[in-house]
Image: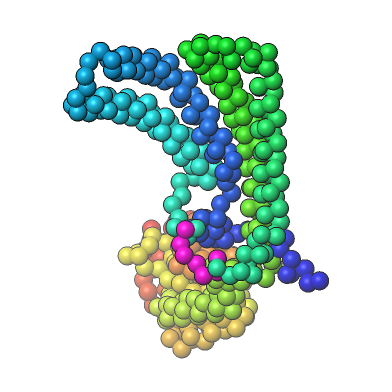
Amino acid sequence: MDTSQERKERATPRKRQKARQRGHTARSPELTSAAVLLAGLLALRWTGPAAWDSLQTLARSTLGALPAREWAVADFQQAFSAWAWLGLGLVLPLLATVMLAGAATSVAQVGFLVSLDPVAPSLSRLDPVAGLRRMFSRRAGVELIKALAKVLVVGYVTYLAVAGEAARLPDLVGMEPRAALPVLGVIAQRVAWRAGLALLVMGVLDLAYQRWEYEQSLRMTRQEVKEEFKETEGHPHVRARIRERQRQLATRRMMAAVPRADVVVTNPVHLAVALQYDPAVADAPRVVAKGQGHLAERIRRLAAEHQVPLVQNPPLAQALYRLCEVGRVIPAELYRAVAEVLAFVYRLTGRLPRQVAPPGQSPAAGR
């Protein structure tokens, strides 16, 4: 089997970004459901006693007045309005709490993400063959196992909670509703809390599995990694051509500066370094061109064509080639050696000696 076709490579940042834009992320619906359930229970625990008292008070005032007087339409409207406002006061805090808990849990899992791709219409979802594949896929099997495990765990936790109150259940039959309701509320609350905590544990485990499966689904083959690298960084041949073009342009600019040089220091054959000293540009001589081999020969030939002096000084040529970049001034340790070369060139070309820096000083100081 061709190993290049096996999905063993980790997903690249570009593929992760594309998957996130499509809404393909690692998240656990079970964890969100558990957070919503526990947040709702907390909200009921905080607001429940006050809400129950308000409900009892309104029921006494409304139902207690039924046989005492005749009710007109306005009385019914007023009672309905009171019950409606009480219902809103009870439901809205609960809804706000569970919505906030659900949103916070989702953001904690995948960050803030808005994507319409999961709900966008797609003809591929109508493909019966693809539908059968999804029904009998590994993911479908895992979801079935998770659903069965959820039923078993929640059922077992509920059984344990109810079994602990089994001795009190027969007594509820003979109790008045006012006395039985608090007992039933305690039992229901205990069952809900235990079921919520069990779902929370299952949600954390499911989130770990979802992240593992997400990483596996994003795995890439070596060929896919190469193709994506070509798309992001460019084809190797194209990059090579761009670099070659850049070298050609740099060489062309460099060769255009050789005729304006003051001197070309040579090795004498292998290296050539062209120097120019212009106080208006820099305080020290600059390297305007350098090369070795064939390029050094071109620099020497171009310098000879434009009557630029050639000076053979192998140690200086090697130092200049090694230490100086094109367009940069020479380092201070080469001032004296370059000053001597420039002095020789200026005497040779008839320039005044005062234009050359004395030994030990920068060439700019004596010019």
Seen in the picture, residue 203 relative to 169 is either above or below; the reply is below
Find residue 51 and report its horizontal and vertical position in percent: 39, 19
Q: Is residue 12 visible?
A: yes
Whether residue 30 sits left or right of residue 120 in the image: it is: right
Seen in the picture, residue 17 relative to 6 is either above or below; the reply is above
Foreground pick, 25 / 320: 25
Q: Is residue 85 visible?
A: no
Quarter occupied by residue 94:
top left
Foreground pick, 84 / 106: 84
Find residue 96 and report its horizontal and vertical position in percent: 39, 33
Foreground pick, 295 / 147: 147
Q: Is residue 120 shown in magenta?
A: yes
> Magenta span covers which residues?
119-125
Task: Write the residue at 38% across / 60% down.
Answer: 283
Find residue 106 and report its horizontal and vertical position in percent: 50, 42
Quarter occupied by residue 191:
top right
Q: Is residue 53 shown in magenta?
A: no
Task: Write the residue at 63% across / 78% down.
Answer: 270
Residue positioned most to the right: 1
Whether residue 219 sits left or right of residue 255 in the image: it is: right
Task: Write the residue at 60% across / 59% down.
Answer: 12
Find residue 322 and report its horizontal and vertical position in percent: 59, 65
Which part of the image, by quadrant, shows the N terminus?
bottom right
